[in-house]
Amino acid sequence: MRSVIDIMDLSVEEIDSLTETAESIIKDPAAFSDRCRGKKLATLFYEPSTRTRLSFEAAMYELGGQVIGFSEASNSSVAKGESVADTVRVVGCYADIIAMRHPKEGAPLVASRYSSVPVINAGDGGHNHPTQTLADLLTIKREKGGFDGLTVGLCGDLKFGRTVHSLISAMSRYKNVRFVMISPSELRIPDYVKINTLDKNRIPYTEVTDLESVIGELDVLYMTRVQKERFFNEADYIRLKDSYILTSEKLAGAKADLSVMHPLPRVNEISTDVDSDPRACYFKQVLYGKYMRMALILMLLGV
């Protein structure tokens, strides 16, 4: 029995296998429509989510399985003081696999140590979001043909953005990847990511505060929102929330084949006039996320 808590729990070979499975599902979804018949996924979401929760549910339904669970902590026995460990012990009696989102870093890891069924981390605080990273990787592969030699711009909240941290970890294992970090000084990438991933793997990166000065260098631009829920001080949030807004005018200086990505939800960091640009990939990411979650569920259930 195996869980996936961090994107680094998956080897490069396993990620390649998952993307191949996802592409097979895209080509022939009917061939996979009964693979999980008789299986149940439990979605344990202790903080709000639209895309991730519905994506997991859609993934399981399209594999022929069923879904149980809750969409906020107040609807569960955690409101009575039940621990994560006890919750997963109980849910493991009803379900074959669990997807968990939790505001506290490390909660899905704790859950995986007590669970009798596989646990997938669907996001824990500002820490990890491995299935979003799988969606990101499939998007990049389908848009760029691969990962080697890319210059990836990461823009916005790089301090609290768990999707950014996971993507850096995943792409650090490919050849000649370079990162350009674009953020206000208060929201720069954490030192532990620099030390443990970038410096350790000798991956070149630059840190800048101005998007327009570097946009012409990028093969991929990964936009993120400034997350109000991660701030203790509302004044700091208000001051920083509009630091970067991508518009069609700013894209004029970008490569013709730039891929613009965003984990969503978007607030106003990408203007809606960008949506019709062929370089906009963020709604494709949503769809690819469903296929990668289908592939991961199949892998962990061994079906």
Image: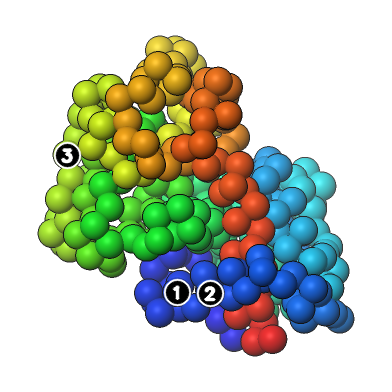
- Return the x and y of residue 139 as percentages of the image width and height: 50, 54
| Residue in the image at 32% along x and 30% along y | 254
Alpha carbons under labels 1 and 2: distance apart: 6 Å
- Tell me whether circle 1 and circle 2 mark residues in contact (CB < 8 Å): yes
**Camera-nearest residue between 240 and 51:** 51
Q: Image check: 54 left or right of 179?
A: right
Where residue 54 appears, as percent x and y from the top left, is 74, 51
Task: Using a 10 Å C-alpha cutoff, classify the residue at mark 3 as few (fewer than 14 neighbours), some (14 to 19) or many (20 or more).
Answer: few
Q: Is residue 118 left or right of residue 222?
A: right
Helix, strand or loop at mark 1: helix
Q: Amino acid at mark 3?
A: Thr
Circle 3 residue = 206
The correct choice, above or below, for 174 with respect to 73 in the image is below
- The residue that mark 2 highlights is 20
Q: Nearer the viewer, mark 1 or mark 3?
A: 1
Q: Quadrant of residue 3?
A: bottom right
| Residue positioned 17% across, 39% down in the render | 206
Determine whether, in the image, residue 38 is placed left or right of residue 121: right
Quadrant the C terminus occupies: bottom right
Q: Which residue is mark 1?
A: 16
Between residue 2 and residue 142, name the one nearer to us. Answer: 142
Which quarter of the rendering shows the N terminus?
Answer: bottom right
Quarter of the view holding residue 34: bottom right
Separation of marks 1 and 3 at Cα, in angstroms: 28 Å
Which label's residue is closer to the chain start, 1 or 3?
A: 1
Kind of residue indicated by mark 2? Glu
> Could you tell me residue 98's position as x and y percent?
69, 68
Q: What is the crowding at mark 1: few (fewer than 14 residues within 10 Å), some, or many (at least 20)?
A: some
